[in-house]
Amino acid sequence: MSEKEKKEGNFLLKITKVNSGSHAARNFLRPDDIIVALDNQFYTFGEKQLKSDLKELKKNKEKAILTILREEIFFNLFIENSLGCKFVTTTVDETTKIKSDYSMQEINDFDQLKEFIGMRDVYRNYEIIENSNSLSAGLFPPLWLAYSQKWWILFLFVAIMAISLSVNIFIFFLGWLLTCIYCYKAQLNLLFSFSMLEGKVFCFKLLSKSMDEAQKTIRKLDPKSKFKFTKLPKPLLEEVEKETEESDKKNNGDKQNIVDEKQTVIV
């Protein structure tokens, strides 16, 4: 944050518009998201100071933790540039409530957090990818593919390696070496591409200490979210939908058993 003297107010900034192609759009911010804190400092310094602080980050090639409130759920982002948004201010009552809620949140330092990128399909099947390189992708690609649950790519890789080994052992070692280098250098792009082939699109960025916590945050924001491998229970809304379907079936059955007064019953 800027070292200039800041004039603290009694309001927060609420996004009303996210400009296309802006830093906010690339971080999947939305209208009605509220800027709560910057580097764990409750931010009531206004739009002008926020722009100044974020420009300072870009100038120094640094990142900061931006805390967002969306639908009463707090989550964090790495931020490194001006957002490119239009804002309105919250009321005094809103600010007071948010400050009280924020004071009960766990505060994490920069080094404790990892960045996760969320992708989902139309059926709300999510894939959460950690935005960092894994050494296993370069040392042993099959293990990395298995850990990433990319089974069809793993089977294809094993088949190609088996064919190359049957042709010439030197071709096998050359292919293995080039694959290891490529997987390490391009692993994130590969994971994103595999997910897009499965019909998923980018939808979310957030900071968390672990994959489990990232999934918990997304489940709070999207109660219908589903994950392939998770410690979370099944989405609650699925159970509600099943109960609703069963209730509808029962009601329809009852309606079929009701005889209208105008109908004639033949025994």
Image (cartoon, rainbow, N blue to C red):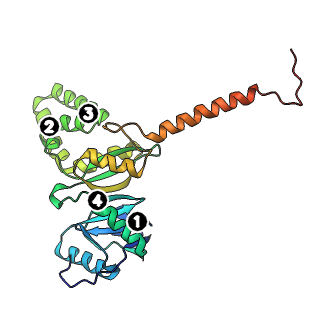
Q: Quadrant of the N terminus?
A: bottom left
CA gap between label 1 and label 2 equals 42 Å
Residue 140 marker? 2
Disc 1 + disc 2, Cβ < 8 Å: no
For marks 2 and 4 on the same chain, the one whose residue lies earlier in the sequence: 4
Tell me the amino acid under the disc marked 4: Met
Q: Position of residue 13 (x, y in %)?
A: 38, 73
CA gap between label 2 and label 4 equals 43 Å
Q: Position of residue 20 (x, y in %)?
A: 42, 69
Q: Nearer the viewer, mark 3 or mark 1?
A: 1
For residue 30, which quarter of the picture?
bottom left
Considering depth in this image, is 100 or 201 the residue closer to the camera? 100
- Residue bearing the label numbered 3: 154
Residue 33 marker? 1
Q: Using a 10 Å C-alpha cutoff, classify the residue at mark 2 as few (fewer than 14 neighbours), some (14 to 19) or many (20 or more).
A: some
For marks 1 and 2 on the same chain, the one whose residue lies earlier in the sequence: 1
Q: Quadrant of the C terminus?
A: top right
Q: Nearer the viewer, mark 1 or mark 2?
A: 1
For residue 251, which quarter of the picture?
top right
Callout 4 secondary element: loop
At 42% across and 72% down in the image, what residue appears?
93
